[in-house]
Image: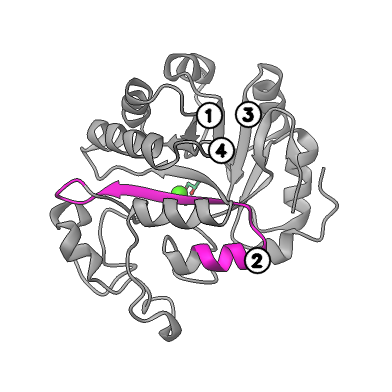
Amino acid sequence: MTPCRPDWPYPTLIAHRGAGHHAPENTLAAMRMGAAQGFMMMEYDAKLSRDGVALLLHDDALDRTTNVSGNAADKTWAELAAVDAGSWHSAQYAGEPIPSLHAIAAFTRANHIHSNIEIKPHTGLDAETGKQIARLARNLWAGATLPPLLSSFSETALQAALDEAPELPRALLISKEVPTDWAKRLQRLECQGLNLNDQYTTRALVEEIRNAGYTVAVWTVNNRARAQELLDWGCNAIFTDEVQTILPADFV
Ligand code: G3P
Ligand code: CA
């Protein structure tokens, strides 16, 4: 598919939440859809069940993307594995389960797909989640061609991931404006770069970060001209929901 950039060994295009618009986000169905669309890298959101099993879910609460209510952190893996995480998207995905990180590792590795695991802790569980997911990432991807890239909005989670598995690459997610002390934060967390919100990404900012030797990946870009512009500015990668819209451009 798209080539990699020299200081970014991963593919340039990353499927957001799997192919999370075309199939229920953060499920194996979304990963299968992304693979069928040609993506070679997937981003997905990982958190812990009450009994410490790592699973894929974006929100703290189950309400938006499953047929049950309440927070994932209050339920056991046995309870979570039984919910329907597909019907909310469309009837054809009725019964699609919430996947464990174990299942996603097996799928992505078998299909030679690279991973960006966004550590998405339930509120207040940042350190525990960062530690557990880094430990699992190290074990589940042992011997992989490229290790999963760990990212998080939570600096506490990234610090715990650094403490647990320093050899895994990390990126700091920024939700709005990039703080002026971004370089200090990256140095402290030993991160390779920033994953930025498209709405707050400017050419000057990209050049500043890239010139300092850090990577920039931008989410979520579903417009071809904008994706091309960001790559022309020197961004390393784009998270997208819409590969079929994005791909025909002459990237890089
Ligand atoms: O990792 C990039 C992006 O997924 C962060 O935002 O809300 O989609 O998890 P969100
Ligand atoms: Ca995410």
Mark 4 neighbour density, 10 Å: few (under 14) some (14–19) many (20 or more): many
Q: Which residue is mark 3?
A: 215
Which residue type does callout 3 highlight?
Thr
- Which amino acid does the dot numbered 4 rest on? Leu
Disc 3 is placed on an element classified as strand
- The circle on residue 125 is none
Residues under labels 4 and 1: Cα distance?
8 Å
Q: Looking at the image, is mark 4 or mark 2 earlier in the sequence? A: 2
**Is tag 1's residue or tag 2's residue first in the polypeptide sequence?**
2
Name the residue rendered at 64%, 63% in the picture.
Answer: 242
| Residue type beneath disc 1 | Val
Which secondary structure lies at badge 2?
helix
118 horizontally vs 232: left or right: left
The residues colored magenta run 31-52
User: Is there a contact, CB below 8 Å, between mark 2 and mark 3?
Assistant: no
Q: What is the C-alpha distance between the residues marked 3 and 4?
A: 10 Å
Residue 32 magenta-drawn?
yes
At label 2, the amino acid type is Gln
Residue located beneath label 1 in the image? 178
Q: Nearer the viewer, residue 226 or 115?
A: 115
Q: Name the residue that disc number 2 marks.
A: 37
Horizontal side of residue 56 vs 48, given as left or right? right
Quadrant of image for the N terminus: bottom right
